[in-house]
Image: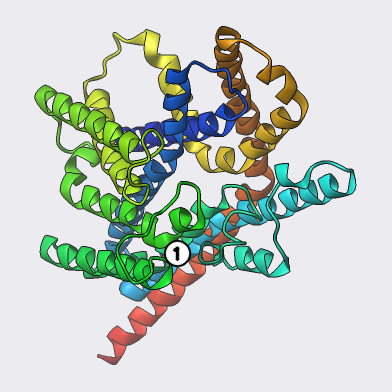
Amino acid sequence: MQQRRIAALDAGRALAIVGVVAVHLSFQFPNLPDAVTLIARMGQYGVQLFFVISAITIFMTLEADCERCAGAGHVALRFYIKRFFRIAPLYYAAIAIYGLISYGAKHSGYERAWVLGAHGPMDVVLNVLFLHALSPTAINNVVPGGWSIGVEMLFYLIAPVLFFIATNRTRLIVATGLLLALSVATMSVADCHDTLDCHVRNNSFLYFWPPVQAPCFIVGMWAWHAFRPHLLGASAITRRGAWLYGTIAAVFALGTAALGVWLAMAHALAPVCAACGAVAFLLVVCAYRARRTSQQPELAWLRRCAAALGRESYGIYLWHFICVYATFHFFDGVLRQTDSRASLALFVATIVSVLMVSYGLSRLSDQLIQGRATRLSRGLLARVDRRFAIGRRELAERR
């Protein structure tokens, strides 16, 4: 049961990271067939798939810790320690590495814009504090793609509170209403001229910042409450249910395309539409994995690749920009001169190459950085557990 659940979520992460890599590379291939370009541009919504999976994983972890911890404070402290040591070490390394790349590009005569946007020391500080999602100059200019990490970390800040508030469906409805009202009010006061008409543009600060992306986490919260048995593998999805969820995923994908990169009807609504489609996709994966048999050896390599990409998706997300920049700088002229068929072949080959190199960099950074951080966090968690255990015994003795 545990393995199936992890496999389903890793499959979602794998799809998300492939989509993100594809969209970032697609801009270097102007001669791709139009249909391929449109599909590749949909890859940007892999970030919303990450957000949904993150919310599911968070609530799953908090629920498991509640069964073994001394109280809400113990659960929350463990959560913050685990999340910080999972995200911060590699992100701080990314700040340093991309800073060196930017410095080297600036002092070697290369175009600085192809590395990072303009930013100052305070923007770096905001990234170190994980407050960069609140600043237009810090949100995506210190670490490329760092906006999504900033949004996630802000959600982590309130996740334990939401978990303990939303203990049943009625309270979850109330929490959802409050969060949505807060998002709308914040956007109205900040950049919407006191109206609900925000004119959110794709890849703008208003698109990146938390009030637009927060509903994706709300969708993930609802997914955990509504589909927990399916996600855990405790309840099977019927064949009819699998077809239904597949149809729903396709409908939401088309809706996302219409709202977002294809027709640009409403970029502010595209993320939540993508998040709903992500939930349906995860349920389809759960249904498939529940029915999978040993009579499908031809797909074993695909499952192994998906599992590997899913496990290393965070590192791949951080380091794939190095590969994207390398292709942009060294192969841009060649890639732009190919015809549509050659462009398609090169595009696929480049995606595979970037994923492989980024996976290798992720594994290396895991050994050099994340492994040490994990051991440190385990030691700190053991101390916290002992402290709360002692406190619980002292409280019991006083009674």
Q: At which x and y percent is residue 349?
A: 60, 16
Q: Position of residue 315 (x, y in %)?
A: 58, 42
Residue 155, by quadrant, is: bottom left
Residue 188 vs residue 96, the one in the foreground: 188
Q: How many marks?
A: 1
Query: Which residue corresponds to mark 1?
Result: 154
Residue 327 at x, y percent in the picture: 70, 28
| Up/down of 333 relative to 371, above or below | above
Q: Residue sitting at 71 percent across and 42 percent down? A: 114
Q: Is residue 338 above or below residue 116?
A: above
* SS at badge 1: helix
Q: Residue furthest bottom?
A: 398
- Asked whether, in this view, residue 203 is left or right of residue 376, the answer is left
Q: Quadrant of the N terminus?
A: top left
Image quadrant where residue 292 sits:
top left
Q: Residue at x 35, y 55 (%)?
A: 58
Q: Is residue 75 visible in the rendered structure shown here? A: no
Q: Which quadrant of the figure contains the C terminus? A: bottom left
Foreground of the two, 347 or 170: 347
Q: Residue furthest right?
A: 108
Q: Residues within 10 Å of mark 1 (few under 14, many from 20)?
A: some
